[in-house]
Amino acid sequence: MKSVLFLSFSGYYEHNGISKKKLAQIKGLEECGCDVTNCYYMVDSDTGHRLWMADGSIVIDLGTGLGGKVRKRIDYNPILTYIKRERISFVYMRSEHNASPFLISFVRRLRNNGVKIVMEIPTYPYDQEYDTFKGKCLLFADKICRKSLAKQLNAIVTFSNEPAIFGQRTIRISNGIDFDSIRLKQQANGKSNEMHLIAVAEIHYWHGWDRIVVGLADYYKSYKHNACKVCLHIVGEFSGERERNEIMPLIVENQLNNYVTLHGKLFGKELDEIFDRADVGVGSLARHRSNITRIKTLKNREYAARGIPFIYSEIDDDFEEMPYIMKIPADESPVDIHQVINFYNRITMNKEEIRNSVRHLSWKNQMKKVLDSIDIAVYENKNSLR
């Protein structure tokens, strides 16, 4: 059994999507037979101390204030010492666009000690996500150092189709699914004179949900009494004023308050109940705004795991040929609600068949691709998730 360190530069928060993904990846590695240590940085909410943690135990207390912030970015010696002491043979590191001379030195020293290391870049390309002055300043150091950092790695893990990133070979995987944590919707996908659309995410401009709100406005301008009633449920908070100002005025000006519901954040039973009512999921409709053509989003996979057909505009190679998806043009045109209704009425797959179609996208299978690519032999866990 191989010892693996899963290294991330941020902590874990209840109901946070990224936190859930990281925990699911760790579970996937364990299902492949790895002994995984979860190493992460966090700020103690009570004391303000900045800590590097390993499976809930303190590796190093970096202190408080500016000194702690600086040490986080320059002092990786405690983690290196921990890796040596625990005889870790493989490090899976999650990038936060934080390449620096200090991180380069850390990775080089790991390699010199015989440790294999890969770095996951969750979204690529990512420069366009930094559109404020502060954001561009934060990105500056990363842009200077990232090619040198990449050179020290064994590989870069990507959810894109890029064969190489920053001059380093890639391991191309899909965002995975933790089927234990995603419940199949309870109500059957039925046809009626009422349709419920669900859009779940922290709302960013690249989601393009203003396009579907405008589409609803157009639909209701010519609405007939016996036509299908279409309702949109948006679950999640606006990431900023830009996103709020793109959507809220459209709802008010077009008198869509009875057809668009902003639920805010929902979790657990409340979220399950909304999914039970949902007929069609709404994925990203404007990744072109951030110059991304291909991406494998977690949300598309959650919709499929829930047994719900869905719409999106990017290229997602895991779903392009599936009969339960509808592609929306990657432009600024409103979503044609009549076409969405027709798409839904043509679907013949039931919720169980939709869920079963993505069984191969389990996190176990995705993490096995990583292990196989860097020739890490592990003992198969026969009791792992199928």
Image: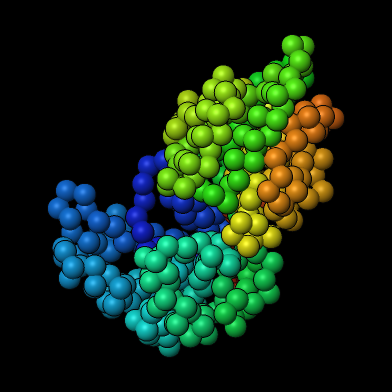
Looking at the picture, tell me which residue is in the foreground, 131 or 8.
131
The number of numbered badges drawn on the structure is 0
Q: Residue furthest front?
A: 253
Q: Is residue 89 visible?
A: no
Q: Residue 253: tell me if it is visible.
A: yes
* Picture layout, residue 78 above or below residue 34: below
Please report the residue visible at 37 percent of the width from the left and 84 percent of the height from the top. 101
User: Residue 103 at x, y = what percent?
Assistant: 38, 78
Instruction: Depth check: give the residue in front, 166 or 115.
Output: 166
Q: Is residue 45 above or below residue 267?
A: below
Residue at the image position 52 percent from the left and 68 percent from the top = 127
Relative to 119, is 341 above or below? above
How did the renderer colour the structure?
Answer: rainbow
Q: Residue at x 48, y 41 (%)?
A: 245
Snapshot quadrant of residue 36: bottom left
In the rendered structure, the answer to whether residue 219 lies left or right of residue 14 reads right
Q: Nearer the viewer, residue 155 or 129?
A: 129
Q: Is residue 259 above or below residue 323?
A: above
Where residue 161 sits: x, y (%)? 69, 66
Between residue 70 and residue 183, name the one nearer to us. 70
Q: Locate residue 15: give its quadrant.
A: top left
* Percent position of residue 50, x then y: 22, 61
Identified at 72% across, 35% down, the residue is 309
Compared across the picture, whether 64 is left or right of 36 comes to left
Q: Residue furthest bottom?
A: 112
- Point out the image quarter for the C terminus: top right
